[in-house]
Image: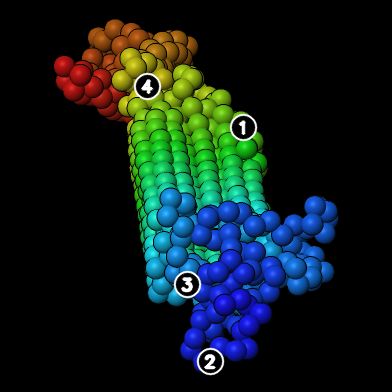
Amino acid sequence: MTIAAESQQGPGQEREAGDGSEIPEWLGQLSEAEQRLWGAFPYGDTVNYSSGDSALDDPARAAEWGPDRTIQAKVICALLLGARAPIPGRTAGVRVVGARVVGQMELRHGRIDVPLTLRHSWIEDTVRIDESVAMSIDLTGSHTGRIIADGARIRGSLKLDGATVTGDSALALRLDEITVDTDLSARDLRCFGPIRLIGANIGAILRMNGCELSQPGGEALTMGGARVGRSIIMSDATIHGQVRMPGASCGSQLYLSRTRITDTPSFAFVGEAFEAVGDGLFDQGFSADGAVILVGARFGGIVTFRGSNVRSNDDEPALHCGGMQISRGLYLNRGFRSEGEVRLIGVTIGGHLDLLGMARDTGPLSLYHATIATIRDEGSHAWPREVLLDGLTYNAIDPYRPAKERIDLLRRQVGGYRAQPFEFMAAYYRALGHDEEARLILMEKERARRATGTPWERFVSVIFGTLVGYGYRPARAIGFSLMIQVAASFFFAVWRPEQIRPDDHVVYYPALYAADLFVPIVHFGQADAFQSHGFATVVAMGLPYLGWILGIAIVAGASRALARGAISG
């Protein structure tokens, strides 16, 4: 029976297409365009409806396409769900180029055993394949309405390369809990509305490089808990809205090189507890108009922000990586700039923290209780103007710089004096065998500790630091003592004291008289037999105090030296 005789068929009966195959009655009369597809399906042939005019064939001009390029969505769905049997020995499938598909593609809960290809076509309404089991789906270059595939299983790949998905502020592309056995490819995708991949499982690669996502002020891409077998590639993307990947993971690399994230509600990229076996690349011009959050993330390779720019929209950190673990290196170098705090509290970095060429106007750098193998810089000038180093530990700073070039860095700490950064850096120099450099750091520590005291305490600090290097320069104290002793001897040789009892036959020695006054404990009897008057009395009264101060400093310095010797032994 031919299609022309359809009017003679009763309800519930089937008709025949022009090729003799039976057509379910509920499909109605097939157009010429639909008959071409119906006939090509069992052979897996591609039906190309394009005109050959590249401008006219743009799906954006689908409104100009006539009936010869129009297919009802229900015809495609019927073929996919088994309305026509394949030809033995051929791979059946819906393979269409340049068609205008009208109506909703309703494939929910279905089992699709043939591939679906709708390339450079225009799909009028929503595509629904939620909780379906399907072969590969290819919508390359097509314009479509919303796509819903919650819980679907794609036994192959899902291709959206160059496609345009137009939804609304609530839904555009929803693929929650989807399983794709191989790649989900969406290169150069344009999506208007949110994309959701919550709990998705991608067997190989998620490709979204060059895509343009638009959900200003909202969540443009959400893939919390998603699992990707290999890499997540989102390089060269333009994203208007927030990107969320909390708890997601990938078996290789995360690429966001040259990607721009703008129009965010507050945070630009949220990757709390994200895990990657390999690298995280936020470099080569990556920019985020909002905070990048990588709290608790883990990377088996490097994480690089080389040449990138991140900016906080409020008082939150611009780059927040608290507790992050990186097996190799973290690169904040070669023009990296942060308009806001870079918070690396508690991070563990198995390789370099590279600050070479970081922008000087970068916000505060917080390394509170961070553990780093090697810090690479160009000296203190490579660091931001404000730092928090309390609790920071490291194995090396590359290249080696003298302590006097590191002191400026320790002075930049926010929040006031902290002892640990000074003590750890001193221990670092001492471990290298540079004890003099270590003493410089410890002297600076004492100076910083006393800098916030009362005016009197600051005055005493200056005197104590000058005379004995806060006890870390006992040799200086001995030198000052000798100079004071010699000066006092000459002084009392000129300003001779009077003998208290003239009848006593005591010989006056200026050096012994000065030593009696200046050297603690030592007693030669000169101070008991002679007494100074006038200005010499002031000098005689001050010498014992100087003697005790310098004596205590010498003992303290000697004790420190002995303690260091005992520890090193």
Which residue has dot 1 on it? 334
Q: Earlier in the sequence, mark 1 or mark 4?
A: 1
Q: Nearer the viewer, residue 74 or 497?
A: 74
**Amino acid type, label 2:** Gly
* Residue under label 4: 429
Q: CA distance from mark 3 to mark 4?
A: 80 Å
Q: Which residue is mark 2?
A: 10
Circle 3 SS class: loop
Q: Quadrant of residue 540?
A: top left
- Where disc 2 sits, the SS reads loop
- Of discs 3 and 4, which sits in the foreground? 3
Residue type at mark 3?
Ala
Mark 3 or 2: the one toward you: 2
Circle on res. 83: 3
Say if 466 sits above or below 250 in the image: above
Q: How many marks?
A: 4
